[in-house]
Image (cartoon, rainbow, N blue to C red):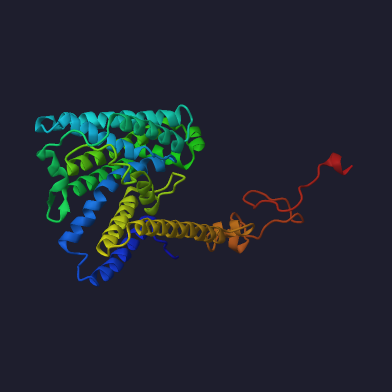
């Protein structure tokens, strides 16, 4: 029997191929893609998008979307920078306040989707526009100040591995555990697969979606905190300039998660983020036209989704082709050497009793043929 690769394994095979191609092309410029500097650049590029994509995976698994993430990131950077205002003593209160505000925004998104019945695309787009209007009205530029102690979050690392990447991978591990081992994770997959079936099975479909939107907003806020630590200030446009809403969705889809929900994994998403980071590093080293980067990203997404769709179609054809049909079902279900194969009766060892044979006694097999008519019907 031929074994099919898991989608997550397929993503990491694609990542290895991208790395090999990147190493060959970068070598033509006299540089090494596996040098500590290049590895650090790639991992640094993974951090911010990785945080946002982890949260986006949650809502997409629930058959929803979150387009408000870039504005949540910008708002988070401003809240953190203004609350800290250069004071190391205010780091913890600022972080807690930022995450609390983000959780409230995610709760609003979840309630609009579940209680009001608005599709996630429209609901989060509306909330994002509200946040954008607030940011444009109250901020004309950067604001606040981040102390040096908090800037270390985005500037330091262990060897070539940034601290921010380690935190991102730890968050991915936590979310993967929640999805695989908790009731919330199982219910989220069920609701994303088929909300009506989940409801009939006793799953409260609102709670998983609300929790997913809260998680998405909190992850976006963590990304905003990371950007604030790198910039040293808060910015009202730091999220929207990076197009993190579309890039996060692209990374999730590239990682093998279905946009219709119900199937996917966090580690596939991390693989998709890594592919984008390697491509960005390659295009920066090769000095590609910045507008060409979006073209290449788009082509990668289209090819990946086409391959995933083809794999699912082939798997469905193989499954139906191998399924027994009609009279073959009983024969296929019976073990070799059983009475179904030999045609003998299990009680007597004789062949099957037909309509012309005597009526079966104790231990005889079933009568095969027309049932005997009663006396009144023969008259």
**Image check: 335 left or right of 171?**
right
- The answer to which quarter of the image holds residue 143 is top left
Q: Quadrant of the N terminus?
A: bottom left
- Residue 231: give x, y in percent of width and height: 19, 43
Residue at 52% of width from left, 60% of height from top? 335
As rendered, which of 155 and 204 lies closer to the eye?
A: 155
User: Percent position (x, y) of residue 123?
Assistant: 43, 33
Q: Between 250 and 168, which is closer to the camera in this rendering? A: 250
x and y, in percent, of residue 142 in the image? 22, 36
Residue visible at 84% across and 41% down in the picture: 375
- Depth order, front residue of 148/92: 148
How many circles with numbers are drawn on the protein? 0
> Would you place residue 111 above or below residue 295 in this image?
above
Q: Name, please, the residue furthest toward the front.
A: 140
- Asked whether, in this view, residue 328 is left or right of residue 217, the answer is right
The residue at the point 36 percent across, 31 percent down is: 133
**In which quadrant will I find the C terminus?**
top right
Q: Is residue 287 visible?
A: yes
Near-viewer residue (74 or 33): 74
Give the image quarter of residue 35.
Answer: bottom left
Q: Is residue 204 above or below residue 219?
A: above
Answer left or right for 113 relative to 281: right
Q: Residue placed farthest to the right in the image?
A: 379
Image location (x, y in percent) of residue 292 = 36, 59
Q: Is residue 164 above or below residue 214?
A: below
Is there any visible trace of residue 204 in the rendered image? Answer: no
């Amino acid at each position: 029997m031929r074994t099919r690769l898991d989608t997550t394994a397929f993503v990491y095979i694609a990542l290895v191929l991208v790395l090999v191609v990147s190493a060959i092309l970068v070598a033509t410029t006299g540089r090494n893609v596996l040098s500590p500097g290049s590895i650090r650049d790639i991992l640094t590029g993974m951090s911010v998008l990785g945080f946002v994509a982890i949260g986006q995976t949650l809502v997409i698994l629930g058959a929803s979307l979150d387009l408000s993430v870039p504005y949540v990131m910008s708002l988070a950077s401003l809240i953190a920078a203004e609350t800290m205002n250069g004071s190391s003593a205010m780091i913890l209160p600022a972080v807690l306040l930022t995450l609390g505000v983000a959780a409230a925004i995610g709760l609003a998104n979840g309630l609009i989707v579940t209680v009001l019945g608005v599709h996630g695309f429209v609901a989060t787009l509306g909330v994002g526009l509200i946040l954008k209007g607030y940011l444009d009205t109250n901020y004309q530029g950067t604001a606040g100040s981040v102390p040096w102690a908090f800037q270390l979050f985005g500037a330091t690392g262990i060897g070539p591995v940034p601290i921010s990447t380690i935190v991102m991978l730890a968050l991915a591990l936590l979310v993967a555990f929640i999805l695989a081992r908790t009731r919330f994770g199982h219910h989220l997959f069920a609701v994303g697969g088929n909300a009506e079936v989940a409801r009939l099975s006793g799953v409260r479909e609102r709670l998983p979606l609300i929790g997913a939107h809260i998680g998405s907003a909190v992850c976006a806020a963590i990304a905003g905190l990371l950007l604030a630590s790198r910039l040293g200030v808060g910015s009202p446009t730091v999220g929207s300039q990076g197009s993190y809403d579309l890039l996060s969705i692209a990374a999730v889809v590239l990682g093998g998660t279905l946009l219709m929900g119900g199937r996917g994994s966090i580690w596939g998403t991390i693989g998709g983020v890594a592919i984008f980071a390697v491509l960005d590093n390659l295009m920066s080293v090769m000095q590609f036209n910045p507008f060409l980067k979006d073209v290449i990203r788009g082509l990668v997404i289209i090819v990946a989704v086409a391959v995933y769709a083809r794999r699912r179609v082939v798997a469905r054809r193989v499954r139906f082709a191998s399924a027994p049909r009609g009279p073959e079902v009983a024969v296929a279900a019976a073990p070799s050497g059983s009475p179904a194969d030999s045609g003998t009766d299990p009680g007597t060892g004789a062949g099957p009793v037909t309509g012309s044979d005597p009526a079966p006694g104790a231990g005889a097999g079933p009568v095969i043929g027309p049932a005997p008519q009663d006396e009144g019907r023969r008259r």
